[in-house]
Image: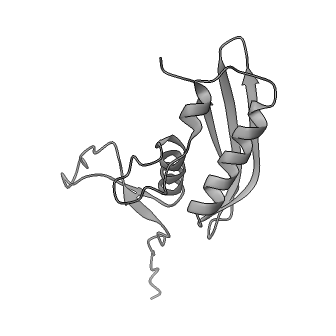
Amino acid sequence: MATTVTKKPARIYKDLDLLFKANAFSGDIGKKFDVNAVKQSMMNLLMIAPYERKFHPELGSPLGGILFEHMLPGTEQTLKLMITQILENHEPRVVLDRVDVIPIYSRNLYQVDIQYQIRGVDEPQQLSLKLTRLR
């Protein structure tokens, strides 16, 4: 009689869910795995201001400061370069394929589409953001 063994999928990356929602079954803080963990990390790198992390002042991005400047042609190239440098320098799990920044002047925002590969994951990934100032 042959028995089949089901194997749990191996988790490559894991991190805490920064929304701090409790797991329904265990009551512990929720976790993010693989693609979702890396995507959360990328969002944090892009949305945290420099010096916001007390013991890691090198992390963070100056994107917020650029959003409070006037929208001028060419600013999207600056944003594209900054996003590329931040992710290449601080997120070694990601290989960037393409970063597109599209200004939408009528709504005073930038549409950012990042296409990337995660090391150890076969399918390509995409992260889409709308960068706008809050005040």
Taking the image as shown, residue 131 lies to the left or right of residue 84, namely left
Residue at the far bottom in the pictured view:
1
**Where in the figure is residue 118, as x and y percent of width and height?**
63, 62
Q: Nearer the viewer, residue 35 or 48?
A: 48
127 sits to left or right of 60:
right
Residue in view at x 65 percent, y 60 percent? 88
The quarter of the rendered structure image containing the N terminus is bottom left
- What residue lies at 65% left-to-right and 16% top-to-bottom? 108
> In the visual, does 106 lie left or right of 16?
right
Q: Is residue 130 above or below residue 58?
A: above
Number of numbered markers: 0
Q: Is residue 13 left or right of residue 82?
A: left
Residue 63 place in picture, x, y as percent? 58, 37
Name which quarter of the figure residue 73 lies in.
top right
Q: Residue furthest top?
A: 106
Q: x%, y% of residue 125?
A: 66, 51
Which residue corresponds to the image point at 38% horizontal and 51% vertical from the top-left?
A: 53
* Farthest right residue in view: 73
Indicate the quadrant where residue 96 lies: bottom right
- Work out whether residue 105 or residue 19 is closer to the camera in this orientation and state it: 105
Residue 95 coordinates in the image, percent (x, y): 69, 62
